[in-house]
Every structure is written in structure tokens, then in C-alpha cells.
Amino acid sequence: MAKRRPDKPGGKKKVRVEFRKNRGKAARDKAQWTRDFHRDAPKSDETSSSEAVRAKGDLSRKRTIVVDEGRGATLIPGTVVRMRGLIAEVDDGEKVWACTVRRVLRTRQIDERHPVAVGDRVRFSGVELGGESSVLTSDDRELSEGVIEEIEPRTTTLVRHYDRRVHVVAANIDLVVIVVAADQPTLRPHLVDRYLIAIHQGGMQPGICINKADLDADGYAAEVADRYRKIGYQVFLTSMVDERGIPALRDALTSRTSVLVGPSGVGKSSLLNALDPDLKLKVGDLSDLQRGRHTTTTASLLRWRFGGFVVDTPGTRQFDLARLASEEVEAYFKEFVDLVSGCRFPNCSHTHETGCAIKAAVETGEITNERYDSYVKIYEECRDKERTR
Ligand SMILES: Nc1nc2c(ncn2[C@@H]2O[C@H](COP(=O)(O)OP(=O)(O)OP(=O)(O)O)[C@@H](O)[C@H]2O)c(=O)[nH]1
Ligand SMILES: [Mg+2]
Ligand SMILES: [Zn+2]
């Protein structure tokens, strides 16, 4: 981090902070927000922020605030629990603060939209304004204002790529549970494979949860669960209706920091409520689902009553895998790894070559057709990207 000017200990310093002006464009934002939901665009964070954080009174784009510069000792440690545009909500263990990020930190990661993400451990200073030291959120919470001065290095990052941009879904996560549904929406294992790659790339442990098992009339979901178990993944087959799988999932999540990811409407928030009724998260109804509307709109870090933390995220249908070299794809397909040495060509792509051990394993059923098709699709996608670069 950049060196701070040697201010007097405990000295106050005036800083210019950018604030968004919310007024006058609310109607347009709202329309845009709705459109984004339909396109499944990750911009929802951004638009909800200008909606969500309403400062009191008329704000100019910039205003002068007084910051307590009194060095490390006066900085308050906390964890980012929610992002609303450029405002990070930080929990210090007692209360939640609305923090902006110091400008020098904003340039830290130029390809990321935000220098901080949910799960980041930060140190911040409290802001004292002339009669104005709190912001009112759209859900009517009054939060004290702060400025993030330091961000701890992350142990892990779950990254989502879209439109050539990078979105850090959450930081410092141990376990990522990919949640899909047996039905409503239709089970698409290919999406699971894409998530698995992102999770392995980020150095986190993956888990797979197939929810709405009560809707698995033909047993397809149970079959998919078995396939992933055979590969070596931990799979939970759960249902809110008959509570199956809930205790096993709770065991896996206890005393850890995890995140639930997956398409909208699969029941991520419902699962969290079933695991811990104290959370009382909003869940979607059928009409929301039919209209493709997301119920959860911003990722939030929550504390389990049984120990540990979890991040509930808004649904994502699409998951781009940028920055993955085509020849690296095989390494992320666990059941391929031990077999590739049997291919005739050392640089075998397992798509068109003869003497391919992977294709042979697909013939014998050792590798499933679905996983192989997933591999080919992702391989070709990465190769096409390399060609257009
Ligand atoms: N049949 C059945 N329905 C379920 C189950 N779990 C959740 N649902 C329903 O699925 C719908 C969506 O649930 P949510 O928990 O809002 O889904 P979500 O994944 O959080 O959705 P987003 O917040 O939009 O990403 C709700 O109507 C739930 O009642 C289940 O096990 N079985
Ligand atoms: Mg939700
Ligand atoms: Zn091969």
C-alpha cells in the first residue's frame, strides 16, 4: 500500500470523497435494473447501489469530509459483508459501517470493478461529518460512515468473468457450494463443470448441492449426484419439502466460511433458511421465477448460528471462463488427470486425435458422455478465444 504522509498522530485531515448523486435518475436506473435482471447481467450490483444507499439531504458529487488519520492504532478491523456500488458495508463485530474506499486503494486492481469484495478483511477509519455521519440504506438501516484504509491480502478469490470484466464474487472463502436444482430450473450439469473450474482456479474446495430433490421424478438428479460422487466430489441431494440432505449439508458448512453459487431460483436462499432459520432471507415465489427475476440482488456475508459464515449470492446463469489456456482445461477435469499420460500424442487435445486415452475411457463408460461433452465445449471455447487474441 502507498505510504501515507507523516501526519501528526491522531491528526485530522480533510479528504475529498466521491459520492454518487442519486437524485434525478432514479426512474431510469430502476428501468435499467429490471432489464439487467432479464439479461442476467451482473450490473445489478451497480444499479442497486445507486438505489440502495440514500444519503440524507442533497449531495454534491464530491464533498469534504474529515477523516481521523491517526494511524494504525485507530483503524478499526472488520469484514466486508455487502457491496452496494462503491460503498462497502463492513461489519466490525458489533455493527455495520458504510465505507468508501480510499482512492489509492481503488487503483489497486485495475481490472476489477471494485478493489474490495464481500469477505475481504479490511481496516477502516470512522468519518465525522458536520452533522452528517450516517447513511440511510434502502431497507432503512442507518449506518455510520467510514473509509477503508487497508485491505488484507486474500487467501482465496472466487472470480467471475463477464464482458471482459472481472467480478470478485467473494474473497477469503474456504468452501464453494454449487447449487443447482433437480428441476425448475432444468438441471444442466455443464454449468456445474464451469463452476468447478473457477473454484479450482481460485484454490477453494468445491461442493455440489442438487436441491429440489422432491422434483426428481425420473431419478436423473440422483444419477448426476452419483456421477460427481464417483469423480470424488462431495454431493448433497437436498429438498426443502422433505428436509433430506439438510443435516449433512449443515455439517459440511459448520465452522467454515462458504459461499453458495448457482442459477437464480434453484433455492440458495431457501436452503440457507432451512439450515439456519435465524437468517430469514427473502426467497422467490413462482411468479418471480417465471419472469426470470432474481430474488437475491446483492451478495451478503452472513453468520451461522451454529458457527462459521456463509455468503448468499444472486443467481448467475452464465459463467465465462476467461484466462484459461485450452491445454490447461484437462487439468480441471479430475477423472481425466490420471488417464492423459495414456494418450499417443503428448499434446493430445482429446478431441480429434487417434490413440486418445480419454476417448477410450468415454467408450468404456469410465468417463461419462456429459463430462466429456463439457470438456470439449470448454476446450473449444478457450481455443477460439486464443485464436481471436
Ligand atoms: N419443490 C421445491 N421447491 C423449492 C425447494 N427449495 C426452494 N424451492 C423454491 O424455489 C423458489 C426459489 O427459491 P430461492 O431460495 O429464492 O432461490 P435462489 O436460488 O435464492 O434465487 P435467487 O436469489 O434469485 O438467486 C422458491 O419458490 C422456493 O420455495 C425445494 O427443495 N423443493
Ligand atoms: Mg436467493
Ligand atoms: Zn487424448
Image (cartoon, helix red, strand yellow):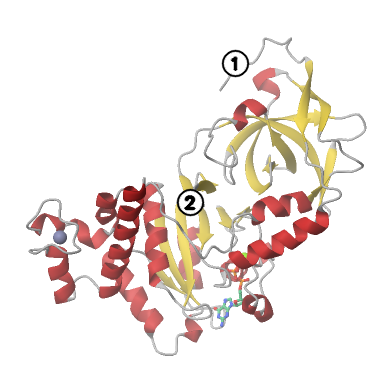
Q: Where's residue 84, x and y in %?
A: 70, 48
Q: Is residue 382 above or below residue 98?
A: below
Q: Residue at x 46, y 79 (%)?
A: 182
Residue at the spot 44% in from the left edge and 90% down from the top edge: 217
Q: Residue beneath label 2, please? A: 161
Mark 2 residue type: His
Q: Is residue 190 left or right of residue 157?
A: left
Q: Residues within 10 Å of mark 1 (few under 14, many from 20)?
A: few
Left or right: 100 as drawn, with respect to 331: right
Q: Residues within 10 Å of mark 2 (few under 14, many from 20)?
A: some
First-in-chain label (1 vs 2)? 1
Mark 2 secondary-structure assignment: strand
Q: Measuring from the top left, give residue 295's x and y in whole percent.
A: 66, 67
Q: Determine whether, in the image, residue 30 is placed left or right of residue 93.
A: right
Circle 1 — which element? loop
Marks counted in the figure total 2
Q: Is residue 139 visible?
A: no
Residue 336: x, y in percent? 21, 60
What residue lies at 92% left-to-right and 42% top-to-bottom?
57
Q: Nearer the viewer, residue 116 or 41?
A: 41
Q: Label 1: which residue?
A: 3
| Amino acid type, mark 1 | Lys
Q: As drawn, is 144 to the left or to the right of 148?
A: right
Q: Is residue 274 above or below residue 11?
A: below
Q: Quadrant of residue 9?
A: top right
Question: Going 56% across and 55% down the picture, which residue do you hit?
Answer: 310
Q: Where's ligand 2: which quadrant?
A: bottom right
Depicted 105 relative to depicted 293: above or below = above
Residue 237, image quadrant: bottom left
Residue 75: image location, x then y, percent: 68, 26
Q: Quadrant of the N terminus?
A: top right
